[in-house]
Amino acid sequence: MSYCRWSTDDFQCDLYIYEDARGGWTIHVAGNRVAYTQPLPEPIELTDTNFDEWWARHKLVGEMVDRADRVPIELPHAGEAFNELTAGAAADRVRELRNLGYHCPDRVEQSLREEAQEDGRG
């Protein structure tokens, strides 16, 4: 299961995080970012009644990604990967990376901390 991917939040996430089948939690750190040439359209939450509107925005964002520039990330750990033994250690790593300036949704660290509590291993 992944907690976030490069495509999360309209391709603005710098981390790709998942529970690794070989053990632990793997965190890949992007080496570059999408730099949109125009502002993103307002987000649309998918509901039972607005699929066509949501899909049109989704397609537009995909086209914007195709036209966007990629800019190198000049922060420590850009392009690196980490494997943490516990969900708690992965949450700590996410916090560290976010404090350095990497983009990742708040809910990712929260989900990892909840999993650590359930595990009892932190």
Image (tube, rainbow, N blue to C red):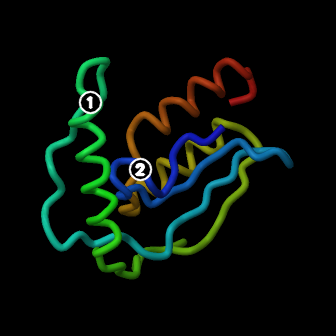
The mark nearer the N terminus, 2 or 1, is 1
Mark drawn on residue 8 = none
Q: Is residue 43 above or below residue 80?
A: above
Q: Which mark is residue 104?
A: 2
Relative placement, left or right, of 5 versus 66 is right
In the depicted structure, whether residue 66 falls above or below residue 10: below
Work out whether residue 68 or residue 55 is closer to the camera in this orientation and state it.
55
In x, y percent, where is residue 37? 18, 73
Direction right: furthest residue:
22
Q: Pointer 2: residues within 10 angstroms few (<14), some, or many (20+)?
A: many
Instruction: Where is residue 114? Give x, y as percent.
Output: 57, 23
Residue type at the position of mark 1 = Glu
Determine which residue is flagged by label 1: 45
Determine the residue positioned at 15% across, 51% down: 41
Question: In front: 95, or 104?
Answer: 104
Q: Quadrant of residue 68?
A: bottom left
Q: Residue at x 29, y 64 (%)?
A: 63
Judged from the image, the secondary structure of the residue bearing numbered disc 1 is: loop
Q: On the rendered image, what quadrant is the C terminus found in?
A: top right
Q: Secondary structure at mark 2?
A: loop
